[in-house]
Amino acid sequence: MRYLPHTDHTRRAMLDTIGVASIDDLFEQAGAPLQQPPTSLPPHKSEMEVEQHLAALSSLNRAAGDGAFFVGCGAYRHHVPASVDHLIQRSEFLTSYTPYQPEISQGTLQYLFEFQTQVANLLGSEIANASLYDGSTGCGEAVLMAHRITRRKKALLSGNLHPHYAGVVKTLSHMSSFHVDQSEVVPGQSATEDLIAQIDDETSCVVVQTPDVFGSLYDLREIAGAAQAKGALLIAVVTEVVSLGAIQAPGDMGADIVIAEGQSIGNGLNFGGPYLGLFACRQKYVRQMPGRVCGETVDADGKRGFVLTLSTREQHIRREKATSNICTNSGLCCLAFSIHMTLLGELGLKKLAKLNHSKAVQLSKALSEIEGVEVINQSFFNEFTIRLSKPAEPIVERLAEKNILAGVPASRLWPNQKPLENLLMLAATETVSDAHINELCAGLKEALDA
């Protein structure tokens, strides 16, 4: 049955009300570039012909695994074991909906509970929720949560916070009459002193990313102490969660709320989503935490079971009492995360992190030997920034023509900023081979010499 609720009569009535003669007249004001061009689809194609045509179209894409790949900046290419995809495809996981009824949702509730445990341990916090949409929305929710806890309305963002994360915070704040300050961008350097100087009695939270968008690592203890001395909260953001296999967790360094993007574990790049927002905080703030929390209990017979314990969303309670209007968690993505984390174990995650760091060190040493290349980071995990003797964006495009994706030019995130146009951010994960590094170095040297 075709689902076309509007009859010719209702469409005519709407056009008459608007005062135009036809649909074409309605869209005339949009201008030719925005109008839908006429389609030229053939009247009939067999299934095999359609499959071949679509395969030819998809072959025009360049997949991350098709060659040298050094792109990071918040989304990372890692190896995901085939067993992860196999297990999440089981029908009881793939088709399950939100677990409101514990008597028929014990499997889903149990993996959410175990996911929360893994996230809390990984981020060094006391309690985690069952995930949010992605890291950037988690960052925005964390700032709103800090406003509720402190009853203040000003957030202070590090200049080295990923611009997309800062953009989400500013968008949410703009519509809520909250104030946002952001320190200057300082590539390759710590912004701690500048941030501490800007904390005042109106500041509800300080948001710092580690490793930051340029790849530099931060010791959060000093800024955590400074924020908390002023009655503000420290929100730590981690976009590369594999780094926590090698460096101290933000919660253990004093962060009150920790946000992370979980895509790196269990989830592919997927053209930019769906991703997985990890959210953890101190136990005393749990009732202000957005999203849902799954808890462990016992039934009337004393048997262990799981239930949704806290769901202070506007679906469940009055809007003015809700902590967030977020509708659900990233269910299948967090299951993939939980399965991959279980397969890795604590030792496996440390080995993966060590391998990532060694690849990045190998890459940085190889690049630093090229004339016209300077590595600007003093410390990094698997991502760092180089300063080139020429603008980075044309060089990245030139290398892409050679099937080498050389990283993200800073000008893509901060357009029209002259001091940043020679900066290039590169990531090296366990998927990068020695041949890829040699290929990049040869291509970059040729581009700089041209």
Image (cartoon, helix red, strand yellow):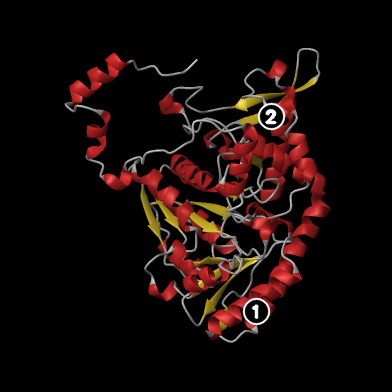
Where 368 sits versus 319, above or below? below
The residue wearing badge 1 is: 442
Where 361 sits versus 237, above or below? below
Residue 302: % across, % down: 80, 17
Furthest residue toward top: 300
Where 305 sits versus 266, above or below? above
On the question of residue 257 being in view, the answer is no
Which residue is pictured at 77% across the width and 35% down the height? Answer: 87
Element under disc 1: helix
Residue 180: % across, % down: 38, 53
Depth order, front residue of 432/257: 432
Which residue is pictured at 80% across the width and 49% down the height? Answer: 344
Depth order, front residue of 304/216: 216
The residue wearing badge 2 is: 94
Horizontally, residue 388 falls left or right of residue 276, namely left
Amino acid type, residue under disc 2 in the picture: Leu
On the question of residue 27 being in view, the answer is yes
Q: Are marks 1 and 2 in contact (CB under 8 Å)?
A: no
Q: Quadrant of residue 77?
A: bottom right
